[in-house]
Image (cartoon, rainbow, N blue to C red):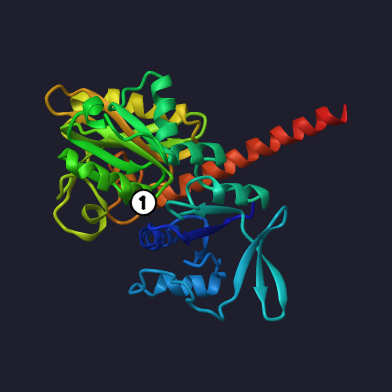
Amino acid sequence: MTATGRIALLFGGRSVEHEVSVTSARSVARAFESTRFTCVPIAVAGDGRWLAPGPSAAVLADTERKRVDDGALPDAPTVVLEPGAGLIERTPTGLRAVEIDAAFPLVHGWGGEDGRLQGALETASIPYVGPDVLGSAVAMDKAVARTLFEAQGLDVAPWLVLRDGTPRDGIVERLGLPLFVKPANGGSSVGITRVARESELPGAIDRAFGCDRKVVVERGIDAREIECAVLGNDEPRASVIGEIAPSREFYDYAAKYLEAGSRLFVPSDLEGRLGAEVRRRALAAFRALDLRGLARVDFLVERSTERIYLNEVNSLPGFTPISMFPMLWEASGLPYPKLVESLVELALERSRQDRRLRTRLQAEDVR
């Protein structure tokens, strides 16, 4: 690695969380100014093109721009990932390497945090922030993740999974009301519906199937929404716990990003009574999904009993100014720029470990 280190900040993407990604990237890019690393922005347009650092920096600088829209900057130079060679920029005069030491993916949702982008970075031999292909994929899939949580004895709300053709009768009898219906793969609460009456269930299921080929239905719990942030590789640590009081019936996309009124409490007043147990379960969930780097772990604490249910794990949480992941670490004594620096250092540490392992395996093959 160079003395300072050049880090490709990937943002935008083709999912419905594109705008959240752009907002996160502006915050992270500012934080890089206070670290020993240099930020190299790479915008991923809605049509899938990766823009070169110059036009990507212009996107970040234009604070009125919310998206890198399809067809935006049509004449802008682009970059591609070259297997084994890294990041290559296409210029009017030919190709040139974009020198980077690691990548910081901030492409939320489909194609960004589900293992696809991580696999592409692996083939190009680029170290990157966050979980690897496996961890990213299983964390993204709520049905697979819940199966793994239950195998580790971690409580989750009663649930079932629907696929195309799965009979839909008997769901209310089995799980009761209210229910939450959600796409198995997705983020920022897109496609999620709270169902209070049985007549609402078919429409909610159809809405979720409009976002994914697999749907999770779970029992609604009268609960407080608690979150904990995890940071680390082989020896992860957990933050203080925070709480969300949403402005709506649940913390949907509008409550998160579009409307005022939702309140965040960092730390939560449950910290003293339940903090240690929430942190223990957050670390257990992190290990159950074989994650590395970072995650935000979301819990439901039932109001009447204070029973703790693991809700989901986000392997690439938001980094906007009002995102819980950086707020939780700030409250735990790790300021935003130091958090960004720590994440890059964890990525480079993991890359060194992987290189040493490959070297040993190659030596064994020679023998």
Mark 1: few, some, or many residues within 10 Å (few <14, many ≥20)? many
13 and 29: which is toward the camera:
13
- Single out the residue that lies furthest toward the right: 367
**Residue 322 x %, y %:** 27, 53
Q: Quadrant of the C terminus?
A: top right
- In which quarter of the view is residue 64 placed? bottom left
351 and 190: which is toward the camera:
190
- In which quarter of the view is residue 313 placed? top left
Residue identifier under label 1: 318
- Single out the residue that lies furthest toward the top: 153
Asked whether, in this view, residue 30 is left or right of residue 75, the answer is left
Q: Is residue 153 above or below residue 360?
A: above
Give the residue type at disc 1.
Gly
- Single out the residue that lies furthest toward the left: 304
Secondary structure category for the residue under label 1? loop
Residue 297 in sight in this render: no
**Residue 50 x %, y %:** 56, 66
Name the residue: 27% across, 53% down. 253
Name the residue: 45% across, 58% down. 32
Residue 130 in sight in this render: yes
**Residue 285 x %, y %:** 40, 28
Q: Is residue 55 above or below residue 169?
A: below
Q: Is residue 256 above or below residue 19?
A: above
Asked whether, in this view, residue 16 is left or right of residue 7, the answer is left
Name the residue: 50% across, 66% down. 43
**Residue 109 x %, y %:** 43, 51
| Number of numbered discs overlaid on the protein picture | 1
